[in-house]
Amino acid sequence: MAFSLNSYPVVYRAKGGPQGWKGGYLEKPHKTPEEEAALGAEERDALKTSRNFYDDMPLVSYTTQYGLSCFEGLKALPQRDGGLAIFRPDRNALRFARSMEGLMMPPFPADLFVTACVETVKRNAALGFCPQYNRDWEKDSFISADSVYIRPFTYTEGGIGVAIAHEPWVLVVTTPVSAYFSGGSSDAVITERIRATPKGTGWIKAASNYVISALAKHEANEAGFMECIYLDAVERKYVEEGSSCNVFFLLKSGELVTPALGDTILPGITRASIIELSRDQNVTVSERTISIDEVFAEGKECFVSGTAAGVTPISSLTYQGNKVIFNHGKTGDLSAGLRDTLKGIQYGTIPDTKGWMVKVL
């Protein structure tokens, strides 16, 4: 698994309220990265754990009691030229504000979001907490590459009783991260669980949405699958998304299909980027409903996309005991090409002609 609770020491925190947003940077307990690596396991774990506690924030809150929170996920990536850059933070900033508005919280301004992400990464890098570019990553199309995962999230004021938040905190923490999906199986399965319902919070990157995702993905992993895919809640026949990623299907006709956005599907930043990159290659891209029957009859390639997933090919999809194998179980040309182009832009081996990368160092 890519993630580990190993927060870098510098954290951004802001508090909202009637007077607007006020925030600053906190430097949590730390040594140099080399000194921390030299510690015994128990002492090192204690130090890392201490960075995850904030004694001046309420334990009983609308977040801890009712899951009233939203978050973002984005990456700062080492560049081949020795720099460091964040992929499309402006898009995450806008989605974060929309999520907060969807939860009836005062939205965090997009300019503050971008600044907080850039500065938090920069301050940690100044302390030595930052991966260095490794040319060996290029050999496997950056599948094994490291990056800095940036996690902005909300945490409400203290409270009990079902209610909305008026004075939430926004925090930005960063951690080292590597490949999200482990090696081995690249098979997926249709889960019987329902991720989101119409008029719900599926379009919001709400913390509560990920309870179902955690359960469904665990069940899929236990059954030997890498990923699970959801069907719609109403007719139970249209594909929606993966446990924490959007999904694409290349059909035999050459059409690349991804489920249309609605109030049950998260508008992924990587999803939008893949659509743009595909159209640049004159691929016909459709955002529409696609049934599981159409996938089984017409699917040629399949991949999932997301900040953590990048572009990850799916070799097969199982539904009610039946199985469709995509591209003879091998990564397809379109899937591989899009993955390589996206990673190349992100890690600086392909020119960023779109202005997607925001420089940190």
Image (spheres, rainbow, N blue to C red):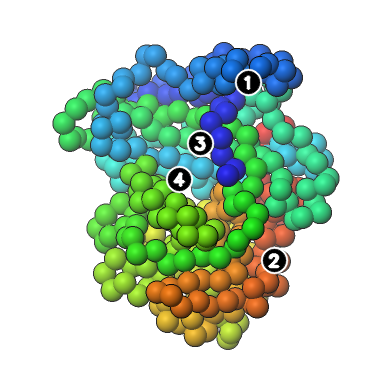
Quarter of the picture holding the N terminus: top right
Tag 4 residue: 94
* Tag in front: 3 or 4: 3
Tag 3 residue: 151
63 sits to left or right of 75: left
Q: CA distance from mark 3 to mark 1?
A: 25 Å
Neighbour tally class for label 1: few under 14, some 14-19, many 20 plus, Cα within 10 Å:
few
Q: Secondary structure at mark 4?
A: helix
- The reply to whether callout 1 and callout 4 are in contact (CB within 8 Å) is no
- The reply to whether callout 3 and callout 2 are in contact (CB within 8 Å) is no
Tag 1 residue: 41
The amino acid beneath tag 4 is Leu
Residue drawn at the location 53% of the way across and 78% of the way down: 324
Q: CA distance from mark 2 to mark 1?
A: 39 Å
Which of pointers 1 and 4 lies earlier in the amino acid sequence? 1
Which of pointers 3 and 1 lies earlier in the amino acid sequence? 1
- The reply to whether callout 4 and callout 2 are in contact (CB within 8 Å) is no
Q: Is 229 above or below relative to 310?
A: below
